[in-house]
Amino acid sequence: MFFSDTMRRNLLILCCCQALVMSAGPLIIATSGLVGLALAQQKIWATLPTACMFAGMLVITFPASILMKRIGRRMGFTLGLLVGLAGALLSTYAIVERSFMLFALGTFLIGITNGFGQYYRFAAAEVASAQYRGRAISWVMVGGVVAAFLGPNIANWSRDVLFGVPFAGSYASLLILYGLSLVLIANLRIPMPDKEERSGSQRPLWQVATQPAFLVAAVGALLAYGVMNLLMTATPLAMVGNGHDFGDTVFVIQWHVVAMYGPSFFTGHLIQRFGVTRIMSIGAVMLAACVAINLSGLTVMHFWSALVLLGLGWNFLFVGGTTLLIETYTPAEKAKAQGLNDLLVFGTVAMSALASGFLHQLVGWTALNYLVLPAIALALGATFWLGRRRANAASMA
């Protein structure tokens, strides 16, 4: 067995928290654009609350990493969940009172919780041996499979249960998810950062960030997330615009999130067997296939199959990028390297979420798909370049 009992227990807790906390993502993606359409005076701002969620992730990623270097993972995750409780309450109140700006602020606070939650994957790597870090990351990200079903279905089942106001109940349900997560995190047993991690010698951040492996890891992850988020956020708007009902949108988003996290059952094994750059390259090819399907039709099955490929491509690029990133820093450099990586990733995510609504309204669904092709080509080129560079170095050794 490659995990001890304590490691396995920690991974199970992190996996469950990943499932509960990340359920907010698909719930908001499936509903916030529609809530925005109902509340915003200018419909072009419909995806602003989604962008605010990712903006919350953006502003907290680097501070959260530095904070947890001092107070530890468990206290950091607890703080993030408390902010999430406040965000869920505010979002529910905003929907009932029909306040678009308060709703956007509520999703921003939920985004801060998601920003802390992104470090579940790094916490998983820290409790596993170096050989099995890829598998540990994959195990925790499997929680996203549960989130894929939990988030959209909670949105659908609870949309009308509170005050008869559509979707107010959906956001109130997040209170339960965050409360359960707090109970689980209280039982997490990860040691506090040691002396080496807190005060060991460090290279300048620019020196860490300009390593070829760091650059490719960051570029692969941010382009995977940016392309995925741009297309995913616009999909509910495109589906409604083409006459599909909310149930169809829930179905498509649900299976998209399954495809994002389902491969985590085996992505770590594939990386270990075939190499991280090869798996990342395959992920980029899957993103290109998604665009091809989006451009070929507008039926529910077109949207479904495209978003499944979008999720698969994201998984291969993002898990691969996270695994590659871990190779690039020492324990003392961990907080700033992880923080910079996620700052770049979620900066791209926030911009893509906001741009998605604008681009869908201004240029349309077809042009939006064409616009992501250069980013996909860059991700493919970067991973192929690093793979060749490593192969050449190995042959000369």
Image (tube, helix red, strand yellow):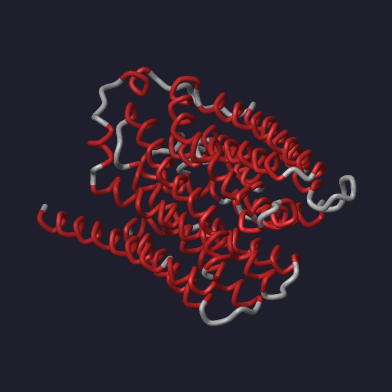
**Residue at 48% in and 57% down:** 315
Q: Quadrant of residue 260?
A: bottom right
**Can you name the residue that lies furthest to the front here?**
41
- Identify which residue, 228 or 282, lies in the foreground: 228
Q: Answer left or right for 160 relative to 257.
A: right
Task: Indicate whether 356 appears above or below 293.
Answer: above
Residue at x 76%, y 38% (from the top left corner): 176
Q: Choose between 44 and 55: the one closer to the eye.
A: 44
Q: Tell me if 173 is positioned left or right of 311 in this view.
A: right
When asked about the image quadrant of residue 306, the answer is: bottom right
Residue 96, image x, y percentages: 82, 43
Provide residue 288's location: percent of width, then percent of height.
43, 71
Name the residue at 75% across, 65% down: 246
> Which percent across, then down, holds residue 318?
44, 53
Judge whether 384 appears above or below 393 on screen.
below
157 displayed left or right of 6: right
